[in-house]
Image (cartoon, helix red, strand yellow):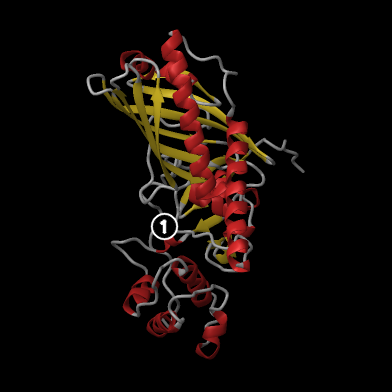
Amino acid sequence: MTYVAADGTLDVTLTVNGRATTLAVAPRTTLSDVLRDRLGLTGTHVGCEHGVCGMCTVLVDGEAARACLLFAVQCEGTEITTVEGLGSAGDQHPLQQAFSHHHALQCGFCTPGMLMSSYDLLAGGTYDEATLAEDMSGVLCRCTGYRGILAAVADVAATHPEGVPAPRAGVPAALVGRSGVASPGAGVESPEVGEGPLAVTIPSGPPTVTVEVESALASPVDDVWAVLADFERLAACLPGAEMTADLGDDRYRGAAKVTLGPVSLAFSGLAHVVEHDPSAHVMRVLAQGADRGGSSTQAVIRLAAQARDDGGTTLRAGADVYLSGRIAQFGRALAGDVSRRMFEQFAAAVDEAARTGEAPHPSSGPGPVRLVLAALRARLREVWRVRGVGRRTWRS
């Protein structure tokens, strides 16, 4: 038996869609989180996280399994097939073709689970048209009424009586996670979180939350810009963050810590300044970070400083923030509140650094824990205010 500290990790080797991959994971990390957050295989959808809805169904050593009910460490040495491995856009599996032909999807959220479950049913040799509806009931759908799904599965069973073809895409071109780390090949360990990639990859699709904050600073715009142009001083203005290395070419490594109740996150990450215009006082930064528990965050950060008539500066800070893993449990509203408060504290720290000409002291101002708790208190006050209004309205 192997014992691991609460914040420790274990190296686990899996063969995912034909490619051997070694990852350092926390013992509590589920297979679904590893597939989605570490390997970027977001076709494995997560719904109930209790093994009921079936959305996260994958094949483990050829048999259907709920990825949300398996710890990644349990899957050491196994072969995992996800919906991405079933077929590709250029070479679809017959099941995928049949689902398209029979319009067996609407919102598409259940479709990966349906495809993997139907493959398991047909490959297992237990297909029976009379019990097909019951056999497919392990994956829940609220859009299609199931008719197109059942028709698609029956179609493939009829056209392939000798057995359903094997998954098409055995080895994808690359498994690139949301953190931008390409999965290594067989026998190669994944990089430590602290080492990480040298490029920032921002996920496609809408961000978890978008934040825009405008702050009035007393310092002149040139002094404010001097702080923003010095990345070490800029990083010191972010609550709970520090710069750990200058990699050159406008790339920097950093670290940040956030704690909320039982959730304690220690992020290591990378920031890349992709736009820096001293004349317009505009900056754009791509940033990403990950912790050993599987949480990850990416952000597109925008900073703009504008002189005011009174000699001060208007600092506009905005970000498109993408969250995954445990940190995403905070929800959009709380993530937005915390991000806004962090930007407000950042603006105050920038003003102080511009006034003194030095980086702010690490202990000055509220830390990330107090920022999160303050956001929680504000959110609870808003909830109780709305409920109070509702009660008064109902009584009147």
Residue ranking furthest to the bottom = 130
Relative to 226, is 382 above or below?
A: below
Q: Quadrant location of residue 134?
A: bottom right
Disc 1 crowd rating (10 Å Cα; few below 14, some 14-19, many 20+) is some
Foreground residue among 272 and 382? 382
Identity of the residue drawn at 48% across and 44% down: 323
Asked if 383 appears above or below 184 in the picture, the reply is below
Q: Where is residue 212 in the image (x, y as percent from the top left)?
A: 39, 38
* Outermost residue to the left: 279
On the rendered image, what quadrant is the C terminus found in?
bottom right
Residue 188 can be seen in this image: no
Q: Residue 85: give x, y in percent of width and height.
A: 42, 59
x 53%, y 91%: residue: 130
Secondary structure under badge 1? loop
Residue type marked 1: Gly
Q: Which residue is drawn at 59% across and 50% down?
A: 77
Give the camera-side residue of 179 and 392: 392
Looking at the image, which is closer to me, 322 or 379? 379
Query: Is residue 262 shown left or right of residue 278?
Result: right
Q: Quadrant of the N terminus?
A: top right
> At which x and y percent is residue 51?
62, 65
Give the labeled residue for mark 1: 170
Residue at (34, 61) in percent of width and height: 88
Could you tell me residue 60's position as x and y percent? 57, 60
Quadrant hosting residue 393: bottom right
In the image as oriented, which residue stretches furthest toward the front? 396
Residue 286 in sight from this viewpoint: yes
